[in-house]
Amino acid sequence: MALQPAAGARDLNPREVEQNRAIRTALAEVYRLWGYQEVDPPNFERIDTLEAGGGIDGRELVLLASEDRLGLRPELTASIARAASTRMAERPRPLRLWADGTTYRCSTGDSGHQRILEQLQSGVELLGEPSAAADVELISLLLAATTRLGLGAAQRPQLLVGHHGLLTALLAEVPEPLRAAARRALTDFDPLALEALPLGDLQTSRLRAVMRLRGTPSQVLYGLEQWLGPIPLLADLAQILAAVRPAAERGEVALRLDPTFQPHFALYDGLVLKLVCQGQQAPLEIASGGRYDGLVGRFSADPQLAAGVGFGFDVGTLRELRGHGWCQPDPVARVLVSYAAATPLATALAALAELHQAGTAAELHPQPLAGQGEAEQVARSRGCSRALWLAP
């Protein structure tokens, strides 16, 4: 019999479970405050839904043995977009939804063996609003959640912002057969792959400069305008970033514009973002998301409603930051109900019920104890605040 969990899975101890719950509760409070309603997408879907129109590589899906082509969800957005465009199609837009739950991804290690990765996510989706106001709301909500979680100067949070259209514009002069490879080189930050492309010296030099172009929004926007001219996309990005800058400054979150940034899943066709914090040993990706109008359009019969933006927090990674002293669950002061051999078990159960009715956490010691001293010793060993000793 195997004594360890499967590769990619984790056993969580009670404290870790409580920390996860505290994080999810804190995030849910923020979502509800902003008018978002909770939904619960299914854990498994048809493969064509999970692949999100080619945005998710089928090799990352955990497939199920069934007559239909089914798999476990690798993220929450596609399922929510499907439900919003079908079962909730008659609801007024914009539609504000939030959800949390476990997602599953398949990966192949260096040895060639597959492993399944579990991830607990919590996030929001804003559907049916194509304007930049939705992008501003999404970033503002992410910043509000960051503040609620207590992330600040100690964790050095940075919000990386990019846009799918920026890369498209920057690659417009690259020969069409080479654009996909050039895009991968830029998004993977792979200078060797970039140098290997059969491009002219001028194009290679320019793309090399693009790869290094990231930092404060004003500086990056200025550099982009030198190459692209005053295109509407740059003006829109400038307005969005200016609108969220005050909230970022209040929350001590550094805004960074990165034209080459793209999230792991290729769901997004507009604004993209990633929240990064400094962990104890390395930077940690806390949340990511963006705009996915094309994905909604695959499910929606009304082109006017084909719009969506959202983000998701990685709850497990947030928990890894617990050493920084935030989002720790309050200890529960439990009472140990114990009894002497001459005391009926029913009496102990009645005392336990009375404590529960008063809202006091209490647990029952199942076997009689010799005396008050032993009861107090057992209570300490079990982390209880005190012992209630029942004797005739």
Image (cartoon, rainbow, N blue to C red):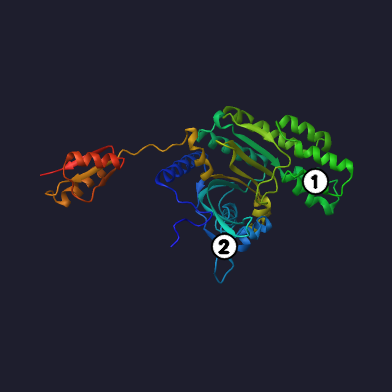
Tell me which residue sits at (54%, 70%) in the image: 66
On the image, the x and y values in percent for residue 186 come to 75, 44
User: For mark 2, does the 10 Å Cα neighbourhood hold few (<14), some (14 to 19), or many (20 or more) residues?
Assistant: many
| Quadrant in which the N terminus appears | bottom left
**Amino acid carrying mark 1 in the image:** Leu
Kindly state the secondary structure of the residue where label 2 is placed: strand
Q: Quadrant of residue 84?
A: bottom right
| Quadrant in which the C terminus appears | top left
Check the image and name the residue furthest to the bottom.
67
On the image, the x and y values in percent for residue 113 come to 60, 60
Kindly state the secondary structure of the residue where label 1 is placed: helix
Q: Is residue 2 left or right of residue 226?
A: left
Q: Quadrant of residue 146?
A: top right
On the image, the x and y values in percent for residue 160 come to 66, 38
User: For mark 1, does the 10 Å Cα neighbourhood hold few (<14), some (14 to 19), or many (20 or more) residues?
Assistant: many
On the image, the x and y values in percent for residue 99 come to 51, 49
> According to the image, label 1 marks what residue?
194
In the rendered image, is residue 231 in sight? no
Q: Is residue 271 left or right of residue 16?
A: right
Going from N to C along the chain, the mark reached first, 1 or 2, is 2
* Res 71 label: 2
